[in-house]
Amino acid sequence: MSSVSFSLIIPCYDEGPTFEASVKKIISSLKKLKIPWEIIFVEDKSKDETAKKVENIVKKFENTRAIFHHKNFGRGKTVNDGIFAAKGKICGYLDVDLEISESYIPLFIKEVENGSDMVVGKRFYEVSAKSIMRFVASKFYSNLVRAFLKLEIEDTEAGYKFFRRSKILPVLRKTKDKGWFWDTEICLRASRAGLVLGQIPVLFIRRPDKKSTVKLIPDTVNYLFKIIRFSQSN
């Protein structure tokens, strides 16, 4: 893996029974790329069997490696560690539940190759009763971000972001949040640093067999306080 061109970071926390099947889909997609790649699993001290599953996958599949946290740090710290460990000039992460399909990977890579420093997924939703609350919460939150912080990215929270690694590393070193607000903060800091930002529409399909770790109402309230705090201190 000395000549890796693309590094995919997969943050892992209590991924449950969907994990192994999703990883196989991701690897199948990566094998179709015409560039050398690697997967970096960052296991954030899960309470279930995720760590053991990561160990087994790394033993079984080439071009994969893992970082294991000694305690639970949160989403932001998990992705940060993966990007710092990456070997590829292009790197990115996605949520392994694949509620946004792995099939978008080549499109995101191409967008970075064509000049973007950071590419963010902009979710649109399959119409269903199960997805309506997430859609409403996402729109509410994006409107808060744009109102308070004047950020043009429409969906900072989508778990699908790719980067030109050399450009994002200085931004990561200034990023403070270790939890879910990391996604918003990295978008804000990248924009203010003058990075070239891209957005790609991605279909979000809620998986009924995957228990989400996101708590919509308390997380949105928590984000609101963090937005206000960020706007006052930056």
Image (tube, helix red, strand yellow):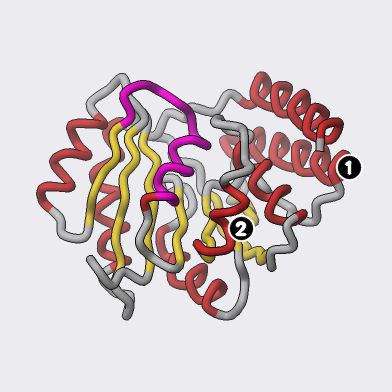
| Magenta stretch secondary structure, dominant | helix
Residue, disc 2: 120
Residue found at x 53% / y 61%: 163
Q: Is residue 3 magenta?
A: no
Specify the quadrant that holds the C terminus.
top right
Q: Which kind of residue does numbered mark 1 sit on?
A: Ala
Return the residue at label 1.
Answer: 147
Please tell me whether mark 2 sits on a helix, a strand or a loop.
Answer: strand
Tell me residue 80's x, y (percent).
Answer: 48, 43
Q: Is residue 97 visible?
A: no
Question: Of the numbered discs in the image, which one, if any, rests on residue 231?
Answer: none
| Relative to 227, 168 lies left or right | left
Magenta region? 69-84
84 vs 29, left or right, is right
Q: Within the magenta stretch, is there residue 76?
A: yes
Q: Earlier in the sequence, mark 2 or mark 1?
A: 2
Residue drawn where x is 87% and y is 39% of the image: 148
Count how many numbered circles sit on residues in the image. Answer: 2
Q: Amino acid at mark 2?
A: Val
Q: Position of residue 92 (x, y in %)?
A: 46, 57
Query: In the image, what residue occupies the spot 40% across and 47% down?
Result: 82
Is there any visible trace of residue 143 in the rendered image? yes
Task: List x then y, in percent, for residue 56.
Answer: 13, 41
Which secondary structure, mark 1?
Answer: helix
- Left or right for 59, reference 92: left
Mark 2 closeness class: few <14, some 14–19, many ≥20 residues within 10 Å:
many
